[in-house]
Image (spheres, grey):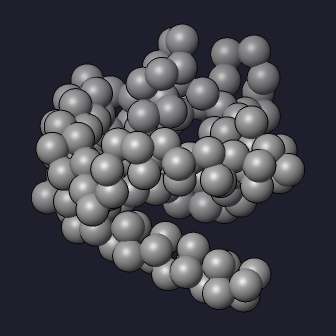
Amino acid sequence: PAMHAVTSLMRVQQLVLGRLDGLLRPHGLTFARYEALVLLVFSSRGSLPLGKMGERLQVHPTSVTSIVRRLEASGFVVRRPHPEDGRAVLAAITDRGRQVVDEATRALVNTDFGLGALTEAQLGQLSDLLRPLRRDAGDF
């Protein structure tokens, strides 16, 4: 049962991620880049150190650097020296970055984030089922 469950979970993750990336492609984003922009939108100053972004997104520092470089090349973020820590670099969202987050979020909401095959009750059940795994991994 555990092997079947993990195989199903991983396959669904691949399918949903593929759908989301397809929805975000017209906006010049992948889901990973979208998540990074949303993180910056919800930060109090619209900027975060790259290290803090990696922690919150739970990705390797080199992945954060790659994501931020691509977002910067698209004009969605700018990198700045940290004003209090000379070793750190901040990623700051631009007005264009905020605009693309709004546009991309509308696209995702209009398609139920790729989960339209589930009812609202099933979505709640899915979240409830996954909560203990996330909590056990320290994801809360």
Farthest residue toward the front?
121
Residue 9: x and y in percent read: 57, 74
Q: Does residue 130 appear in the picture of this structure?
A: yes
Q: Is residue 109 above or below residue 130?
A: above
Q: Quadrant of the N terminus?
A: bottom right
The quadrant of the rendering that contains the C terminus is: top right
In the image, residue 90 above or below residue 7: above
57 to 59, vertically: above or below:
above
Position of 37 with respect to 4 (left or right) is left
The answer to whether one can see residue 35 in this image is: no
Q: Is residue 77 placed above or below 44 in the rendered structure?
A: below
Residue in front for this viewpoint, 13 or 80:
13
Residue 111, percent from left and from top: 19, 51
Q: Residue at x 85, y 50 (%)?
A: 136
- Point out residue 64 in the picture as x, y percentages from the top left corner: 60, 53
Residue at left offset 48%, top offset 21%: 42
Q: Front-most of 31 and 9?
A: 9
Q: Nearer the viewer, residue 94 or 20?
A: 20
96 left or right of 123 in image? left
Point out residue 113 in the picture as x, y percentages from the top left corner.
Answer: 30, 51
- Count up the numbered dots: 0
Residue at image x 22%, y 31%? 102
Residue sitting at 25 percent across and 56 percent down? Answer: 116
In the image: residue 51, left or right of residue 103: right
